[in-house]
Amino acid sequence: MADIAGLEYTKLLLAADGSLAPGATADYPAGVTDVIVISHGWHVDPDDADGIYHKLIGNLVAEAGRQWAGAGRKFGVVGIFWPSDKFRDDLSAEGFVPAPSGTGTGAAAAFGDAKETALLAQAKDLAAFLQIGDADEFLAEVKRAAKGNGKNGDAEVLVKRLQKEVRKRRGGRSANLARIRKETEREHAELLDPARRRRIIADLAAQGTPGAINNLKAGGAAAAFKKTGRGAALGVLSGIRAGVARLLNQFAYFEMKKRAGVVGTEVGRRLVAAAELDGVCIHLVGHSFGARLVTAAALTMGRRHPSSLTLLQGAFSHNGFGTGIVHDGETIDGAFRKVVAGKLVDGPIAVTHTWNDTAVGLAYAAASRVSGTVASSIGVTRWFGGPDDIFGGLGANGALRLATGEGSSSTFDGKSVPALRDCHVNNLLCDFIVDHNDVTRPEVARILKASLALQGS
């Protein structure tokens, strides 16, 4: 029997559509009172995910194990493993060519263009991630579009191909999946709407002309990101290959958001159907896009409400639980509004957030935009990635646009176990978290301990 710090540990290995991976079985810890279902996020392979689970749960057991025994509670762990690592969500500093002297204007031009090798590596990863059958032809389309020359034809072929690929897998027909899909498609409307396709194509073509710098002004964001070395990661590169790379990135994020919702919905169905979990308290924990996954599970679980929901640096919209959100001239609710309004979680909903997490605060917000606009400073601002940005992320700002009484916000220093309210969104500003993946530390384990209602036991 596998274990984490003495807790029985099973693995749920899933395919992109939420079905069991080939050869996998759905097994759950036996003889337990509580089970922790935990999911990883982006850029994580199975070994990395396993390491995250072991470290976080190990710290949790160190905090609470003795108290569990005294309270007569026995915990098990189910680790979710889903395909989320097969694409490059940015181009590193090694992935671009500095601009030749005298080209472009201002600081933006100093970033130069993406290297062809880096672009093709990204395209190859994306082909695998999207399960594109004719990958060689796709790579050829990417290469032709990246030649640019100020012409639209090759760019149009690539954009149409990408739109076709992401529309192939629209997911199931349930109302919950439709709601999640609609939110994702709304956030990426410019990618999917044929009427808006011309803007994308024109932008790509313009980047193939001499001196193009992606409409970034001298100084400001470009200068700041160049100074801090963040320019490549956030797409502040000039040139046609960089433009194509950003386009591929947009579609990868779209597919990742959708896939997390699809897989999470299937996880929820499995948890409800598992006779082994009858009478067992289920605690959902998700990191990054895994937060979106477990929230989709909560939305689907119906009669078997989870006992808690803990979202660690969540990579989905900060409006996901909200209501009365004005976007593109319409007033809408977040895709996961029902989780809060319908009180689908019996215990607390805990949300960690900090602007130290640039993956959610900056890269996530940038990846939700076709325009390639970046922040006007080296960090998150209220209007870019922050609370006033329609594309801001949960892990940056917490859950926003909630109805009165549904949520609260507080600063958590990590030194003690926080007090969390049941059937309530508890936003915790956690500036001790220094980056997106810094979620396995003892301070975070104390939040998880509180979510499991152990602080008084």
Image (cartoon, rainbow, N blue to C red):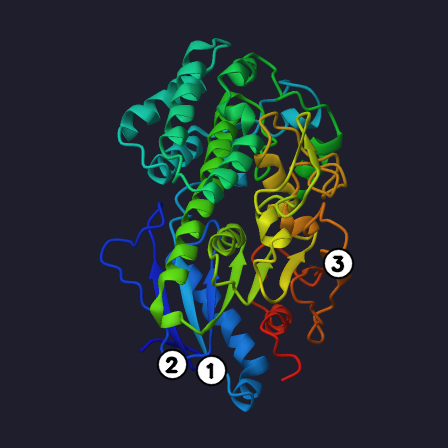
Q: Looking at the image, tell me whether mark 1 or mark 2 is earlier in sequence order.
A: 2
Left or right, residue 182 beside residue 79: right
Q: Residues at badges 1 and 2 in contact (C-beta under 8 Å)? A: yes
Q: Residue at x 72, y 74 (%)?
A: 415
- In this rendering, does residue 256 appear at all? no
Q: Which residue is mark 2?
A: 31
Q: Amino acid at mark 2?
A: Gly
- In this rendering, does residue 435 appear at all? yes
Q: CA distance from mark 1 to mark 2?
A: 8 Å
Q: CA distance from mark 2 to mark 3?
A: 36 Å
Q: CA distance from mark 1 to mark 3?
A: 30 Å
Where on the picture, by quarter, is residue 186? Answer: top right
SS for tag 3? strand
Q: Residues at badges 2 and 3 in contact (C-beta under 8 Å)? A: no
Q: Amino acid at mark 3?
A: Ser
Left or right, residue 389 beside residue 19: right
Q: Which mark is residue 408?
A: 3
- Eyeballing the image, is 71 above or below 364? below
For this orientation, the residue located farthest to the bottom is: 70
Q: Position of residue 228 (x, y in %)?
A: 68, 43
Q: Looking at the image, tell me whether mark 2 or mark 3 is earlier in sequence order.
A: 2
Where on the picture, by quarter, is residue 14? Answer: bottom left
Classify 10 Å Cα crowding around label 3: few (below 14), some (14-19), many (20 and above): some
- For this rendering, which residue is in front, 288 or 249? 288
Classify 10 Å Cα crowding around label 2: few (below 14), some (14-19), many (20 and above): few
For this orientation, the residue located farthest to the front is: 303
Q: Amino acid at mark 1?
A: Lys
Q: Which residue is mark 1?
A: 74
Classify 10 Å Cα crowding around label 1: few (below 14), some (14-19), many (20 and above): some
- For this rendering, which residue is in front, 216 or 70? 70
